[in-house]
Amino acid sequence: MIDRAVHQVTKAGEPLELNPREYRLLTVLAEHPDVAMSTEEISRAVWLSENTYGRDLTPIVASLRRKLGGLEYIKTVRGVGYRIVSDP
């Protein structure tokens, strides 16, 4: 559950401690459930910049997956980027 009003994410009623980039990654993917988004598209949202050259999403995705409890929520779309699963 993402509550944008208070900038809080909960899973099974428990709050998740996300850093700003993890939060932005999660919200941009959640805005487009089940849609494959390019790494460039996601990077612009995560770093709030058009210039994302050399920025790597991999550690942010890995950290967010750990905090969400596994790989079932955020899927890698080979050659494209990532997508969030609306009903894992």
Image (cartoon, grey):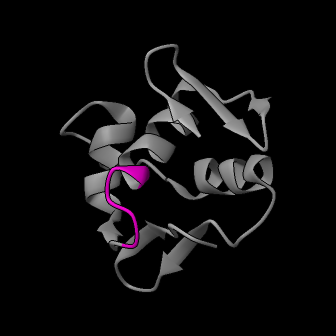
Instruction: Determine whether 3 is above or below 87 in the image.
Output: above
Q: Give x and y (percent) for residue 73.
A: 63, 65
Q: Give x and y (percent) for residue 22.
A: 57, 38
Asked if residue 29 lies in the magenta stretch, the reply is no
Instruction: Determine whether 69 is above or below 27 in the image.
Output: below
Q: Residue furthest bottom?
A: 78
**Residue at figure coordinates x 32%, y 59% from the top left:** 32
Q: Give x and y (percent) for residue 23.
A: 53, 34
Residue 10 lies in what quarter of the image?
A: top right
Residue 37 lies in what quarter of the image?
A: bottom left
Instruction: Determine whether 14 is above or below 86 in the image.
Output: above
Residue 35 lies in what quarter of the image?
A: bottom left
Left or right of 43, for residue 67: right
Image quadrant holding the C terminus, namely bottom right
Q: Residue furthest top?
A: 6
Q: Residue furthest front?
A: 13
**Residue at figure coordinates x 74%, y 32% from the top left:** 16
Left or right of 63, for residue 56: left
Residue range highlighted in magenta:
30-34
**Residue at figure coordinates x 79%, y 53% from the top left:** 66
Report if residue 25 is visible in the image: yes
Left or right of 27, for residue 21: right
Q: Give x and y (percent) for residue 1.
A: 59, 40
* Number of numbered labels in the structure image: 0
Chief SS of the magenta region = loop
Camera-nearest residue between 43 and 71: 71
Camera-nearest residue between 45 and 11: 11
